[in-house]
Image (cartoon, grey):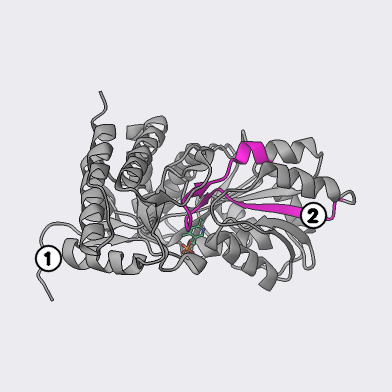
Amino acid sequence: MTARTGRHFLQIPGPTNVPDRVLHALAQPTIDHRGPDFADLTRDLLHRLKPVFGTDDPVVIYPSSGTGAWEAALVNTLSPGDRVLAFETGHFATLWRDMAERLGLTVEFVPGDWRRGVDPAAVAERLAADTSHGIAAVMVVHNETSTGVTSRIPEIRAAMDDSDHPALLLVDTISSLGSIDYRHDDWGVDVTVGCSQKGLMLPPGLGFNAISDKALAATQRSRLPRSYWDWANILEANESGFYPYTPATNLLYGLREALLLLEEEGLPNVFARHRRHSAATREAVRGWGLEVLCADKREYSDSLTAVVLSEEHDADKVRRIILERFDMSLGTGLGKLAGRVFRIGHLGSLNDLTLAGTLSGVQMGLQLAGVPVDPAGLQAALEVLRGE
Ligand SMILES: *Cc1c(COP(=O)(O)O)cnc(C)c1O
């Protein structure tokens, strides 16, 4: 094993780099989760979380991964046999579909080529065909982390409104929350699913649901079995600042610090930074002579970029060389993209020089792996970062 110096570059699209201030916050002594100080912490967090979701609705925090928060969104609103509409945007949309099926829902899964987001016209078409209003929910992954494609939620919402269809809108914002502009209230989303380890710059372990009035009303009718995930118990305990079971106290300290960091930078600046970093990354990829997986420029993800290699090159070999030589982790190709793409995460706690270092490592790794690249790629990215 070679000794490592400096910091590891964790440039996967989650978990992301945890800022020092958050690490220090996590290291505080654990307190009594039934005591008065804890109640103050809960109230403060539930208040500070709202702008990140763009909502005045309640937000529930689970000690869970994002997958748990997915399950919570489904079991609190739906009943066995309910029909739901979902879209094959990539690996995560497929996993959420699989979960819905295992829970006993009937999923209408609109096929996709893993290079595009949800087509609002397809939403309109499917809902218009559902004249009996049998579809209970529409499930959308806002930012598909396997492909680097961001679906246009406002247009999807408009398609639902135009069809006058009462289905709930459930949105996974796991890799967009805190990185890409998102508005639970303005976009009429019913359940927003999030988690801690991506744009929120925390370690894994917290899941979130933001819940509209309509989603809350749906819990009255919903008959899927639920216990741990039940919103009702949590919302009731939250009233007095507590939880029905032991919360992840130290992660909540970290969450408060991460929310302060976002407030200090200002969400519009956070989103602009991610937009600039994604633009610089795409300049590098194109300059190298390689292809970005996302096929529609309206849907480029600001939080990660998936890079396609030609058949004769193995993306995992490139990643391995970069890890060994430069101590940097990049995202692997998931599902049917295995070996074909690698993913550059540019979300969370990073700055221009972190991105410049990341793209330098990618360029050198590609060259070492024998992938022909034009070094003008890095220069083009630096020009975007330099600005004027
Ligand atoms: C990471 C991710 C998930 C899964 O979250 P876990 O914390 O691994 O359970 C789901 N959806 C998207 C879009 C993701 O990026």
Circle 2 — which element?
strand
Residue at 37% of width from left, 61% of height from top?
Answer: 331
Where residue 177 sits: x, y (%)?
47, 46
As rendered, which of 109 and 18 lies closer to the eye? Answer: 109
Instruction: Please state if 210 lies on the left or on the right of 204 as rendered.
Output: right
In the rendered structure, which disc, 2 or 1, sits on the residue that comes first in sequence? 1
Mark number for residue 135?
2
Residue at 61% of width from left, 53% of height from top?
Answer: 236
Residue at 29% of width from left, 33% of height from top?
Answer: 384
Q: Residue furthest top?
A: 388
When the figure is inspected, residue 178 is found, relative to residue 249, above or below; the finding is above
- Label 2, label 1: how many angstroms apart (C-alpha)? 54 Å
Identify which amino acid the numbered label 1 is placed on.
Answer: Arg
* Residue 287 visible here: yes
Span shown in magenta: 133-156
Where residue 135 sits: x, y (%)?
79, 54
Q: Residue furthest right?
A: 132
When the figure is inspected, residue 315 is found, relative to residue 308, above or below; the finding is below
What residue is pinned by disc 1? Answer: 4
**Quarter of the rendering containing residue 376:** top left
Where residue 107 sits: x, y (%)?
73, 63
Instruction: Please state if 246 lies on the left or on the right of 274 as rendered.
Output: right
